[in-house]
Image (cartoon, grey):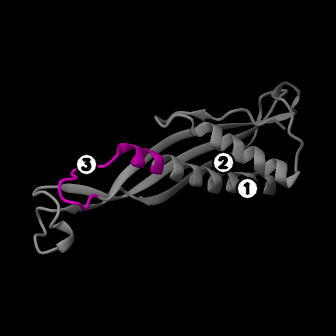
Amino acid sequence: MAVPMFKNKTDLVGIEAKFTNVLIHEFSRSKVSKLVAKQSAPVFIEGEIVSLEFVHDAQLDASKDDENPANNDLPKNTVLTSVYRSILNVNVKLIRTVDQRVLWTGGFKNERVYIAPQVKTPGANTVNPLYNHSAEVEVVELLAEDMMVEAHDRMIESF
């Protein structure tokens, strides 16, 4: 069996390596199949990260709640996202090398929530965008682990 690099159709660069590595690790750990180069493998896995969406889930609107002490340090008419939902879709296929016949296919959709950077101090009206990017990458890596373990388990149950 071979596990070539996943295809990444999202805007988040580099996440395909995490998905590929997690799946390789799962097959290496389970010893269900020997991993070899694609040209000498009887079957290979084709993975595709189809979509990744970050949804602004919970928002704090400082202009609507003057009684809330948490809003006292924020400028008027400030709306901050406090929670993001990350929604990820991945397709995985097991393909026979000789005739390119699809032996197994699975679609995986999963989501996780992460807390957005919080702005609470007077005068600080922005946050470091690197924090949010790091949080996005970290949550996608956690999703990759969950989804590829499930893909491995579902795939080997079929055979």
Counting labels gives 3
Q: Earlier in the sequence, mark 1 or mark 2?
A: 2
Q: Amino acid at mark 2?
A: Gly
Residue depth check, mark 2 versus mark 3: number of the one nearer the observer: 3
- Label 2 sits on a secondary structure element that is strand
Residue depth check, mark 3 versus mark 1: number of the one nearer the observer: 3
Q: Amino acid at mark 1?
A: Arg
Q: Is residue 31 magenta?
A: no
Q: Residue beneath label 2, please?
A: 106
Answer above or below: position of 150 versus 19. below
Q: Residue beneath label 1, please?
A: 154
Q: Is residue 120 magenta?
A: yes
Q: Residue at 18%, 59% (x, y): give it.
A: 122
Res 17 → quadrant: top right
Label placed on residue 126: 3
Q: Residue at 84%, 54% (x, y): give it.
A: 30
Task: Find residue 159 and report its horizontal and vertical position in percent.
Answer: 84, 52
Res 142 → quadrant: bottom right
Task: Find residue 10 and report its horizontal and vertical position in percent.
Answer: 49, 36
Q: Residue at 84%, 38% (x, y): give it.
A: 1
- Label 3 sits on a secondary structure element that is loop
**For this view, does 11 lie left or right of residue 44?**
left
Badge 3: residue crowd in 10 Å (few <14, some 14–19, many ≥20)? few
Q: Earlier in the sequence, mark 3 or mark 1?
A: 3
Task: Find residue 77 and report its horizontal and vertical position in percent.
Answer: 11, 56
Q: Residue at 18%, 73% (x, y): give it.
A: 69
Label placed on residue 143: none
Q: Earlier in the sequence, mark 2 or mark 3?
A: 2
- Label 1 sits on a secondary structure element that is helix
